[in-house]
Every structure is written in C-alpha cells, then in structure tokens.
C-alpha cells in the first residue's frame, strides 16, 4: 500500500474502531484471516521442491484429477471457501498452476453440496471454527521445532487456525447485522422475488461467512413456510455466489495467480448463478423429476433444496469445466501482472545472427552492459555510486561517512538489472550454435563464463551484505574497522579494474597490469586473515565474530576474482598490438606468490 | 645503382624473419620504456599517499614492475645476442 494511502487509512480505521465495536471485530477478523493466509503460504513454501509438490503434481496434473482433489477436500472440510483459500496459497507458493487451481474450484463447488445433504437429511451442521484453537496450539508447537518440515507443518496448522479464527471473529461481529435479516419480510413472487432473494442470499453468506449457514437458514425458513420454495431456490443461488467472498478476501494477500483464481471462483459461480436464474423453471422441473426418482417426498422441500444445490453446481461444471483454458486466457487478460521495470538488452539484435563475428561482438557488448549493472549493484550495496570511483582520495572517506541504515535491496536490483539481461544473453548464445566455427564457439563460451562470474560476484555481495549491515553499527570498533576495510578493498578493486579497462583503451600495458591485480587480491586476503587472527588472539573480537569476518573475507576475495575474470574476458577481446610481447613479461603463479611474500616482509 | 637498391629492397622484403625480430626488439624497448615511466609514476604516488591499502597496492605494483622489467631486459639481451650471431 502506498505510504500516503496508509496515512489516510489508519485514522479512518481508528475512527471506525471508536464508533463501532462490531466494525472493530470485523476488521480484526479480516486481519487475522489475512495473517493466516500469509502463515499458510509460508508453511507451504517449506515443502516446495519436496513431498507436497510431488503429491500435488500427481493429484492435479489433469483437470479431472484437480476436480477430484477439490471435491474430496471440500467434502472432508465442508467448506468450499476454505478449499479455495488453501488453493490460493498453493498458487501463491508456486505449487500449482491456474488450470489445476480452477479444476479444484469446480471440484470444491460440487463437494460443498454434500453439506446441504447433511443439513437437509440429518440436520447436521459442521462448525469448522471449533478446530481453530487446537490447530493454533499444535501449529505453534511445531513452529518451535528445529526441523524445516516440522516448522512448515507448524505454519500450515497455525495458518489454518488463524483462518478459522478470522472467520469466527467476522461471524461474531456480523451477528449484530444477522439479527436484522428477516427472510419473511421480503417474500415476493415472480422474477422480482428471484432477484431480491438471490441478492439476500449473497448478502447473508457474506455476512455469515458460510454458505452452509445460509443453507441452514434457508432450509429452516422453507420448512416452516416462512418463505416460498421458489424464493428458497434463489437464496441457494445467492449463497453460492456469496461464498466466493472468502476467496476474494484471501486474494488480497496473494500474488497475481491467487487473484486470478479468486476471480475464477467468482466468475464460475456468478455465471452459473445467472444461467440457473434464466432457466429456473426448467431446473425446478428437473429437481422434481430427480427427487421423485430418489424417493424424496413432494412436500420435503429441504431435501429438494439439497438436490437443487447439487444440480445447480453440476450444471456449472458441465457448462464451464470444458472451457478452463479459455477462462485462464480471460483471467490473464483481466489480471495483468505488473512487472517491475527491467533492463532490456541493448545489443542482442536478431540481425546479428547472420555472421559469427557480429554474434560474438553483440554478446560482448551486452555482457559489458551487464558488467556495468553488476558494478552498480556492488557499489550501491556499500552506499556508493559510479561517479564516486573518479574521486581517488575520497573513496575511503565516503565509506566511513556512509551510515545509511537502509539496506540496499540486492534481490530487487538483481531482478531489475541482471536477470533479464543474463537470461537474454544465455538465450542468444544458445541460439547461435556455431559448431562449425570453433573460434567463435570458444569466444561465446568464454563470454558465457564471464557473465557467470558477474552473477557470482553479485551473489557473493549479497552474502556479504548481511554482516556488513549487521556489524557496521556494532559497538566494537575493531569489527566496524574490518568491515569498512572489506568494503573499501572491494570498491578499490572495482576502481583498479576500471583503470585496467582504460589501460586497454589507451594501450598502456593492460596484460602486465593484470599481474598486479592478481597479486593484490592474494595480498589483501592474506593480510585480512592475519589481522583477524590477531584481533581474536588479543580478544578484541569474539571467535564467532572472527569466523564471520573470515567468511566475509572469502566473499571479498571471490567478488574480486570474479570481477577480474569477467573484465579480462570482456575488455581484453581485441587486445593490443604488443600482446604477444607483453605475454613474455607477465608473471606466472609462482612469481606472483613470490611477489606477495616479498611485499609482505617489507 | 638502381638495380643495387632494388635488390636490397627485395632482400629486406623476403627477409621477414629478420624484420620480425627487429619489430620484436622495438616493441620490447617500447614496453620497457613504458614500464619505467609507470614505475616512476607509482613511486611518486606511493610517496604521496598515507592510505595503508594503497601503500600495499603500490608496493606490490612496484615489485611486479621490477620483475617484469628484469624479464624484459633479459629477453632483450637474448634477442640482441642472437641478432649479432646472425
């Protein structure tokens, strides 16, 4: 929610709480319900890539299997609303696709009609809210366990508990309004009666948060002749439409797929409702025929209503189940996913595919584009900008002064600046299969590796960021100094890589500069580890903090190495005219190690 | 005279190996000169800074340039000796 909107909503809600106790209860119910949704989603995420995913895949891999899954779940839970809510959380966790989700909705619509048979036949009403308390207790107990899967189960149970508790609070608070509903007051014949009672059914179900409660009310009212049989049919239609509100509330906390599924639930039930209203007489006749065949007495309106409920939902399935794919297309058009503005490839033109050389050059330029974005992310992690690199003396000062408490969102930046480009580069390379041109093929392979190095550098930065944010505000000055040193060394390395890039452009012995950069990485790493050991020995930092520093120093080394490897491939492409001669003077691994040792003893 | 000059040019044209060696020596001399300039620049930068990280970096760079120059001089001497022998 936008911050400005939040400033309006909070006082409005507060005023509402002051005005009405019932409003407070409803708002709290909705909040608890949504919190339950979040918890449920988190719980299901613990099982992604595991058992639950495999079970769901096997039980929902065809629309008919999804239908069966939905039917069974709704029959057992006696709530289509709850089934749709759980399905929404499956979708949000990425465990299901929309087609399977809609299949489950169809199944749950039919499964929930078994409730009407129970109410009409046995007078039973399953109150699912009674499960809330034990679910919460068992859920919290599981959350406190160490195992990931137990924790996941804990979140699922707690989520279900909160969902039911939320529904309970909403119901309790709506009871005030429920007492004002007197069905007999609105008894009227004809089309007007149908429409009014359908609307009443919708409102009653929204208020009571249960189509079963509306069914119970309807069956009671029709059995004591408070309302006519025709009006009761309309109430059932209304209840079926009103029951979708639970999914709609749940979709507020869900992603776009969840919203689409809630939309599907409303669309299916609304269209079925309209269809049945148009052919209500024919449905009445069909119910009479079926009831007669089932041995239901003509005067047993309660059982006839249950028959109508089943027939009505069956009609919806027959009508709309074959159109699942069309529904998905429609919902994808209505609920358009808002993607964050992402960086588009600049150089990957399909026309470049005509010649191997242009393919390589396009990929190289695009990889440099990605390199620029990677540098942007790494610098921003440490509170710096690209233009800061031009200021030689102030780099350390800028890092010292940076006390911005806001953590740079690397994930969001990765999605925006890297992922799209990286995917496009990989796809472009894959399309260009130059098996007959070994030189180009090798170059593309190196470029692919260079991109991989850049992505790894960002991942290492993300790992490092956790402790960088945590320790730079520590009370221990030695820790702060070391983390600032890590940040400074990374930024300094980026600056040196940039200098290396300019040396290539100016033909200023770039190959020989590479040796210095390689030796500096080794030197910095060795020094850092030695300082950490000293700090632990002198008890200036705890061994735990020391181990964090050692890990982060490894991340630092990895970031530097990856950036250098990428830069080497990306910028040394055409190389200088004296590359061969420079190669003669460059140092091998042993010589570099010797230099590191010599400098260390100085 | 003209024929003599033409023959001399032809000989140089066909003697690519000699030409390449000369080019190699020239390139090496240029690189050594650049390295020397770089060494001076870094020595100056080292004197100007009091940043520990930069000091280590410059020291490393100076040491590397020293070895690179030593290798370069050795290769140059070898090439010159070979040229004399030929």
Image (cartoon, rainbow, N blue to C red):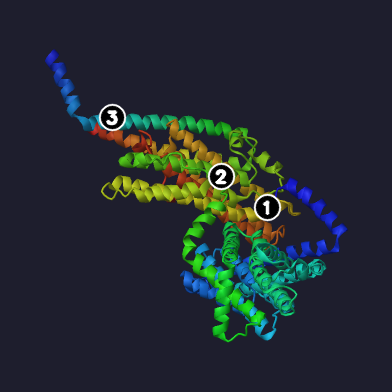
Residue A471 in the image, given as x and y percentages of width and height: 69, 54
Q: Residue at x 39, y 47 (%)?
A: A428
User: Which image quadrant for residue A26?
Assistant: bottom right
First along the sequence among labels 1 and 2: 2
Residue B65 in the image, given as x and y percentages of width and height: 47, 38
| SS state under label 3 | helix
Residue A460 in the image, given as x and y percentages of width and height: 55, 54
Instruction: Out of A460 and B86, give the one closest to the viewer.
Output: A460
Q: Which residue is mark 2?
A: A341
Q: Is residue A444 left or right of residue A256?
A: left
| SS state under label 1 | helix
Q: Which residue is mark 3?
A: B22
Counting every numbered tag in the picture gives 3
Q: Which residue is mark 1?
A: A469
Above or below, A553 against A34 in this view is above
Instruction: Out of A210 and A342, give the one closest to the viewer.
Output: A210
């Amino acid at each position: 929610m936008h911050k400005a909107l939040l400033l309006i909503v909070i006082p409005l809600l507060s005023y509402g709480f002051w005005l009405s106790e019932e409003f407070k209860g409803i708002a709290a119910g909705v909040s608890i319900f949504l919190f339950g949704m979040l918890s449920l989603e988190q719980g299901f995420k613990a099982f992604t890539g595991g058992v639950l995913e495999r079970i769901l895949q096997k039980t929902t891999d065809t629309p008919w299997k999804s239908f069966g899954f939905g039917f069974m779940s709704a029959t057992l839970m006696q709530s289509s609303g709850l089934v749709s809510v759980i399905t929404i959380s499956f979708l949000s966790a990425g465990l299901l696709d929309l087609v399977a989700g809609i299949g489950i909705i169809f199944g749950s619509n039919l499964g929930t009609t078994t409730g009407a048979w129970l109410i009409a036949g046995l007078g039973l009403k399953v109150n699912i809210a009674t499960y809330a308390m034990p679910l919460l207790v068992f859920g919290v107990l599981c959350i406190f366990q160490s195992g990931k899967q137990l924790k996941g189960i804990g979140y699922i149970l707690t989520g279900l508990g909160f969902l039911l508790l939320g529904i309970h609070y909403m119901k309790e608070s709506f009871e005030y309004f429920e007492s004002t509903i007197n069905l007999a007051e609105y008894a009227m014949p004809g089309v007007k009666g149908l429409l009014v009672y359908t609307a009443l059914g919708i409102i009653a179900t929204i208020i009571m948060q249960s189509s079963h409660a509306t069914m119970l009310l309807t069956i009671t009212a029709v059995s004591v002749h408070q309302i006519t049989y025709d009006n009761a049919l309309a109430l059932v239609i209304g209840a079926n439409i009103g029951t979708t509100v639970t999914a709609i509330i749940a979709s507020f906390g869900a992603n776009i797929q969840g919203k689409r599924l809630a939309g599907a639930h409303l669309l299916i039930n609304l269209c079925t409702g309209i269809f049945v209203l148009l052919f209500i007489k024919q449905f009445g006749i069909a119910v009479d025929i079926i009831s007669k065949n089932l041995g239901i007495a003509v005067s047993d309106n309660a059982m006839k209503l249950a028959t109508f409920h089943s027939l009505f939902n069956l009609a919806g399935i027959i009508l709309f189940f074959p159109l699942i794919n069309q529904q998905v297309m429609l919902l994808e058009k209505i609920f358009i996913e808002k993607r964050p503005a992402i960086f588009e490839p600049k150089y990957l033109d399909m026309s470049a595919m005509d010649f191997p050389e242009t393919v390589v050059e396009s990929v190289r330029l695009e990889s440099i584009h990605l390199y620029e974005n990677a540098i942007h992310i790494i610098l921003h992690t440490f509170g710096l900008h690209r233009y800061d690199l031009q200021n030689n003396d102030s780099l350390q000062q800028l890092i010292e002064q940076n006390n911005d408490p806001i953590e740079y969102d690397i994930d969001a930046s990765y999605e925006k600046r890297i992922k799209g480009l990286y995917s496009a580069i990989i796809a472009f390379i894959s399309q260009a299969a130059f098996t007959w041109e070994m030189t180009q093929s090798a170059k593309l392979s190196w470029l692919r590796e260079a991109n991989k190095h850049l992505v790894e550098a960002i991942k290492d930065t993300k790992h490092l960021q956790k402790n960088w944010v945590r320790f730079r505000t520590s009370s221990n000055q030695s820790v702060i100094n070391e983390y600032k040193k890590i940040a400074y060394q990374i930024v300094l390395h980026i600056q040196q890589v940039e200098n290396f890039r300019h040396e290539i452009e100016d033909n200023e012995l770039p190959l020989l500069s590479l040796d210095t950069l390689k030796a500096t990485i080794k030197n910095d790493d060795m020094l850092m580890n030695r300082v950490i050991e000293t700090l632990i020995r002198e008890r200036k930092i705890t061994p735990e903090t020391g181990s964090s520093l050692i890990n982060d120093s490894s991340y630092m080394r990895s970031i530097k190495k990856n950036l250098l490897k990428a830069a080497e491939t990306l910028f040394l492409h055409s190389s200088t005219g004296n590359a061969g001669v420079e190669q003669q003077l460059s140092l091998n691994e042993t010589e570099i190690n010797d230099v590191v040792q010599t400098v260390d003893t100085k | 005279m003209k024929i003599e000059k033409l023959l001399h040019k032809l000989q140089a044209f066909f003697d690519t190996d000699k030409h390449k060696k000369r080019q190699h020596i020239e390139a090496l001399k240029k690189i050594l000169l650049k390295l020397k300039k770089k060494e001076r620049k870094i020595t100056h930068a080292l004197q100007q800074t009091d940043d520990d990280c930069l000091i280590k970096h410059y020291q490393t760079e100076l040491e590397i340039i020293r070895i690179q120059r030593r290798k370069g001089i050795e290769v140059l001497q070898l090439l010159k000796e070979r040229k004399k022998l030929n």
